[in-house]
Amino acid sequence: MKSSEVEIFGTSYTVRGEEDPEYVHSLARYVDEKMRALQKKSPPTIGAHKIAVLTAVNIADELFKLRRKQAEVENIIQKKTTDLLDILEGD
């Protein structure tokens, strides 16, 4: 297992896993950027915990939208493949 030291929203974390440390650092930077962007839009009374939860919800929203889009693209590819096979079999 690889270990990486990252900083997110001013707090240091040790992340252990199989992924390349540079990849883990890029994930941490992404989360940190999302949290800081949300903090800029929020009232100053919003704490780090709430910022973290709202950021997690926003990232989950991004993931769900990408999954939906991927499923749509896969359906289009499947339909076009079926249409092409029908054309080829018709010859």
Image: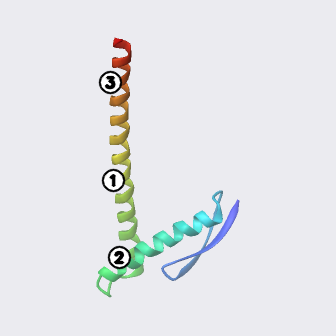
Q: Is residue 69 above or below residue 12?
A: above
What amino acid is found at the position of numbered circle 2 in the picture? Leu
User: Position of 22 compared to 57: left or right?
Assistant: right
Callout 3: few (<14), some (14-19), or many (20+) C-alpha neighbours within 10 Å?
few
Q: In the rendered image, which residue does mark 3 sit on?
A: 83
| Residue lying at 38% horizontally and 48% vertically, measured from the top left | 67
> Mark 3: which secondary structure?
helix
What amino acid is found at the position of numbered circle 1 in the picture? Lys
Task: Give percent across and percent down for residue 39.
Answer: 36, 80
> Mark 1: which secondary structure?
helix
Q: Residue furthest bottom?
A: 44
| Residue lying at 58% horizontally and 69% vertically, measured from the top left | 25
**Which label sits on residue 38?**
2
**Which label sits on residue 65?**
1
Query: Considering the image in quadrants, where does the C terminus appear?
Result: top left
Give the total number of marks visible in the rendering: 3
Give how far apart the Cα atoms at labels 1 and 2 are. Answer: 19 Å
Give how far apart the Cα atoms at labels 3 and 1 are. Answer: 27 Å
| Residue lying at 37% horizontally and 31% vertically, measured from the top left | 78
Query: Considering the image in quadrants, where does the N terminus appear?
Result: bottom right
Q: Residue furthest right?
A: 1
Give how far apart the Cα atoms at labels 3 and 2 are. Answer: 45 Å
